[in-house]
Amino acid sequence: MSEENDEARTGEQERVLRTLDPRSLRGLAHPLRMRLLATLRLDGPATASQLAGKLGESSGATSYHLRQLAAHGFVEDAPERGKGRERWWRAAEQGMLFDESLNSDPDPTVRGAADLYLHEHATMHTQEVANWLAVQREWPEEWRRGADLSDFTLRLTSAQALELNERLHDLIESYREAAPPEGTEGAAQVRLHTHLLPRALD
């Protein structure tokens, strides 16, 4: 499973993805930390106070959890923004890869962190869909036509499921490479979720 965003940074930077290991997973698997990191990836650098206002949290809570994220290498200082008294933060990487072996780690604390991470990840997807449904009429018709909320049922082998996942990811990457420059009129940041879930039959 991958979680990737185009981060709003100044200048061109190589896109970096991080594979979660047991230690980093335990450091990230907290609802507020995951929301803080996702917000920095989606919206770019911010201060603890700005993030607190956006997420409806206290600045003390966001400051503490940003420091914890920094201790595990998920966020870092944004020196190009840090000209005032407040500390600015940015995401250290543009996305993460979740190793499925974490679900079967012999350490129960790692398995618990994996469960929390995946459930919170799904919760954030649900919230993004709900947010779109709440504001969709504010968008032009061409954007409403381009948006999608579909589901499909296929009969596949596990090998075919893996192949489908890989082909979908390759297709998505091709659109990232063809993305218009920042500031292009008519372009907007979009979120794309993929869920491929086997279903048990009675």
Image: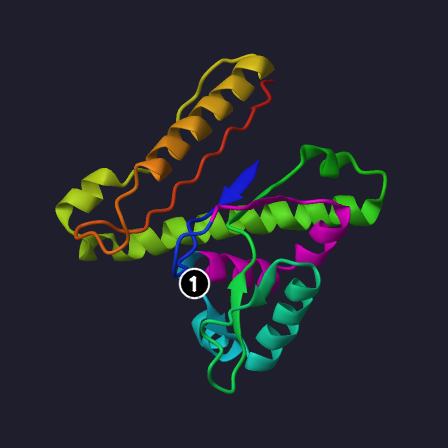
Main secondary structure type of the part rendered in magenta: helix
Magenta highlight on residue 33: yes
Q: Is 130 drawn above or below residue 104 in the view shown? A: below
Residue at the (32%, 52%) spot, across then down = 132
Taking depth in this image into account, of 182 and 114 the one nearest to the observer is: 182
Residue 60 x/y as whole percent: 61, 81
Q: Which residues are magenta?
A: 14-41
Residue 24 x/y as whole percent: 71, 52
Q: Quadrant of the C terminus?
A: top right
State the image quarter where residue 193 is shown. top left
Q: Is 49 drawn above or below residue 92 in the view shown? A: below
Residue at the (58%, 51%) spot, across then down = 120
Residue 73 x/y as whole percent: 66, 58
Taking depth in this image into account, of 39 and 151 the one nearest to the observer is: 39
Magenta highlight on residue 6: no
Residue at the (45%, 74%) spot, across then down = 81
Q: At label 1, which amino acid type do we have?
A: Gly
